[in-house]
Image (cartoon, rainbow, N blue to C red):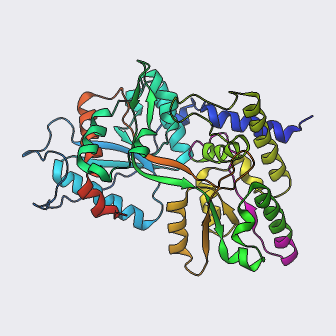
Amino acid sequence: MPGKSLYIIIVSIIIILAIIGGAIAYYYLTPPTTTPIKTTPLTASPTLTTGVATPTTPPTVVKELILWKQVYADPYAQSVWERVYKEFEAATGIHVKAITWEPSDGNNKMMVALTVKSPELLPHVSNMIGELASMVCAPQGCLEPLDDIYEWLKANWGNDLVIELFELMKWPGPDGKLHIYQLPWGASVWMLNLRYDIMKQAGLKPEDFSTFDKLNASLYYLRDYFKSKGIRMIPFDIQLSPTSLGDAPEDVDMLFTIFAGVHVYDPKTKMPLLNATPENFQALVKVLEVLKKWYDDGILPKGAITESDMINNVNFINGITFGTPNNVGTMIGVAKRQHPEWEYIVLPLPASDKHPEPFGILMPRTFLIPAYIPPEAKQAAKEFIKFVLNKTNYEKWYGYE
């Protein structure tokens, strides 16, 4: 009979996937005390195509746009975003008040504020929370449809727009029809982020992580290797906290896809597949069994039960863990800047009998607008999104590949 630790993990994962944590406490409804980012208006370049109309006088109603976003990955990322805020204010006269959150904390607050329909608690625009916001909130009418900006983007970017990424963001609204409720400003890919220097030191090769059975064996080998060499490093990291809404669902999706051969929901119909068949349900049971065994056997950190996605990333960046499936792009970039002497390797998620090909899980990083904020705030939020996603601006700030 499963022990207490398995019960904790089962409850944790179910809460993660359902997004129903007990977050209605006062703490989760009160934004932190922060100092708004002070901006100095810049002179807009006469040749800059902003993608939004530049008024001759500042708006008379909305002087400040409230943005909730994830904490900056590092000073470089912060400098890029602060440049965006300054140039937006120069072009529109609207000051951006950016309030940053640790992902799990901010996501909880956003989900609660959306579902209880409290305009006074909501930002005008958010770029923190993932597509699960649409899964939970779109059918309730809590999110503003953004189909009009999607059509504008297709015209603005032409053939360079990755349509598949945007199609992932279509979810049923209150009318039962599919709409765009979140617009990607970037994307992360869930793959295996591993310390290549440690891998070679331990005598392992990339192919030793190519299937789940090989991955599992390699993780146990590394646990014993670290212990024998006196190396204080944990083989792997998957957060199991019930409040970790940021990345934890993708970590569960990774294992579920390996064991079931399908993702946790159908990308076209958006219907959940966790218990669509007896085989799928058994795959979910196996996910929980693997997580319990990894946790009990020291493959995962003992803090994984209370760990957030940000702590998972920090563990990897600080050399506490050998590998993690979390968020390839940003984390590897920060790690390379902080530890250029280390070697890294990114490998596909492992194959299995049910999923014979290695794979990755794409997670868009998105903008959303709450449905219950004033109309003038919605308009300002849409101007901000179009300003950021305009092709000329985006390539200038973030580069283009």
The image quadrant that residue 385 belongs to is top left
Q: Is residue 228 magenta?
A: yes
Up/down of 167 relative to 223, above or below: above
> Looking at the image, is 139 positioned above or below residue 326?
above
For the stretch drawn in magenta, the main secondary structure is loop
- Please name the residue shown 27% across and 63% down the image: 396
Q: Is residue 130 visible?
A: yes
Q: Quadrant of residue 46?
A: bottom left
**Residue at position x 61%, y 77% from top?**
343
Residue 143 or residue 358, whichever sits in front: 358
Q: Quadrant of residue 127?
A: top left
40 relative position to 54: left or right: right
From the viewer's perspective, is 60 left or right of 37? left
Q: Which residues are magenta?
A: 225-246
Of the 4 image quadrants, the one containing the N terminus is top right
Given residues 205 and 148, the one toward you in this image is 205
- Indicate whether residue 99 is drawn in magenta: no
Which residue ends up furthest to the bottom in the rendered image? 341
| Image spot of residue 14 (x, y percent) | 69, 33
Residue farthest top in this picture: 175
